Amino acid sequence: MNDFWPSCGHHLLDRNADHLLVPTDEFLKVYLGRPELMPPAEACAAERALFAALLDRPRRVVSDAEIAAIADTDARDNWRHMIAFRDHLLRYDTIEAAYLALIRESRRVPPLFLDQLVHLILRNALDTAGDVYLLRAAEMLFRPQRLTFHEGSLIAADDEHVGDAVNSPLIAMFDLSPSGNVEVLNDDNAPTYWERSDRFDFAFDLSRGRRGLAALAGVLERWLEHLLGLDVAIEPFVEPGELALSWYVGLDAEATRLGDALWRSGALDENEQSRIIVLYRLTFGDPGIVIERLAGEPIYLMLAMTADRQLRMKPQNLLTGLPIGKLATAT
């Protein structure tokens, strides 16, 4: 089986009998390598001492006094965030359980930390996936995308990568200063995904009726199965012009806004409709887990882009927004 996304650090984690991720000292030390925590040349003795102590014992208790003794204000804030996050991870047996607790408790953590956890969890959930369309679709859950229409297709590209793009026929469509390369994933270049998976440099066709949206549906199905143990089927549904929403989940902030508008009025204007990338219909394998008042009612998932064609998915919405009576959990 081909490896992919080695940069997420999945090889530094252990796995329990349920194939869930277990933190290790080696994994915790990775955080110490971040530029926000590496003591610069001018760092005070307290900051250097804390860094050295954690490098030796990454699980050691860190007191408020140790952080307060750090002279630099920004460094103190960075250490507080990191230690609070580390302590949260260590309160749970698995990375999956720690992530679920973060989103259920609505804890405020740096988005970078949440994206990293999603990256790791998806790497685990998709460990045996052989379909690179599935893997490219999964990138959208933890990396912001920039979208454009090109020759009748809706194309998504990694926001960070296209900021460095050059020598690509798509560059003018993304309205960027060229400095890199953008290539749309297709059957001819798909085999090269494995060797370049950490570059996040493939653009992705999200046009309706094509393979990309079906691949994203497959990722969402695995996301729910891995974290909540839910058996669901997700498929693109209809044009959301006239539609009564009994229940919906916005997969990003713009989709939530548009879904609320559709909920209130029962329709969207032409401009609002143009921002919707896809409307999925979700079906539970066991309909009996749905709350009683929604029994038999359709459940919709909406994905949308902003007016400036940005997309930042919020995969946590899918975990907290479904109308199920008893929430399953990864432990």
Image (cartoon, helix red, strand yellow):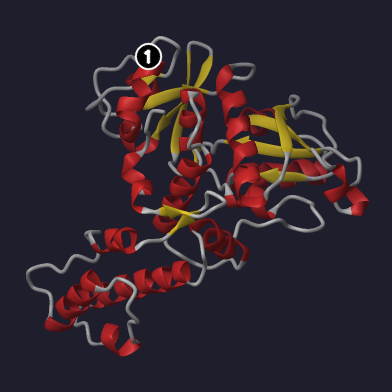
Query: Which amino acid type is shown beneath numbered disc 1?
Result: Asn
Mark 1 Cα shell of 10 Å, populated few (<14), some (14-19), many (≥20): few
> Can residue 175 be seen?
no
Asked if 43 appears above or below 223 in the picture, the reply is below
State the quadrant of the N terminus: top left
Q: Residue at x 53, y 49 (%)?
A: 19
Q: Is residue 69 visible?
A: yes
Say above or below: 3 vs 100.
Answer: above
Q: Is residue 279 left or right of residue 117?
A: right
Q: Residue furthest front?
A: 17
Residue 276, relative to residue 26: is it above or below? Answer: above
Q: Secondary structure at mark 1?
A: loop
At which x and y percent is residue 254? 60, 43
Outermost residue on the left side: it is 41
The residue tagged 1 is 189
Q: Position of residue 217 (x, y in %)?
A: 63, 31
Quadrant where the image shows the C terminus? bottom right
Number of marks: 1
Task: Identify which residue is drawn at 37% across, 34% down.
Answer: 4
Quadrant of the rendered structure where residue 101 is? bottom right
Residue 253 drawn at (x, y percent): 59, 48
| Closer-to-camera residue (172/88) | 88
Q: Does residue 238 appear to the left or right of 63 in the view shown?
A: right
> In this rendering, would 102 be left or right of 114?
right
Give me the residue at 41% from left, 51% from top.
Answer: 116
Residue 128, percent across and down?
Answer: 50, 33
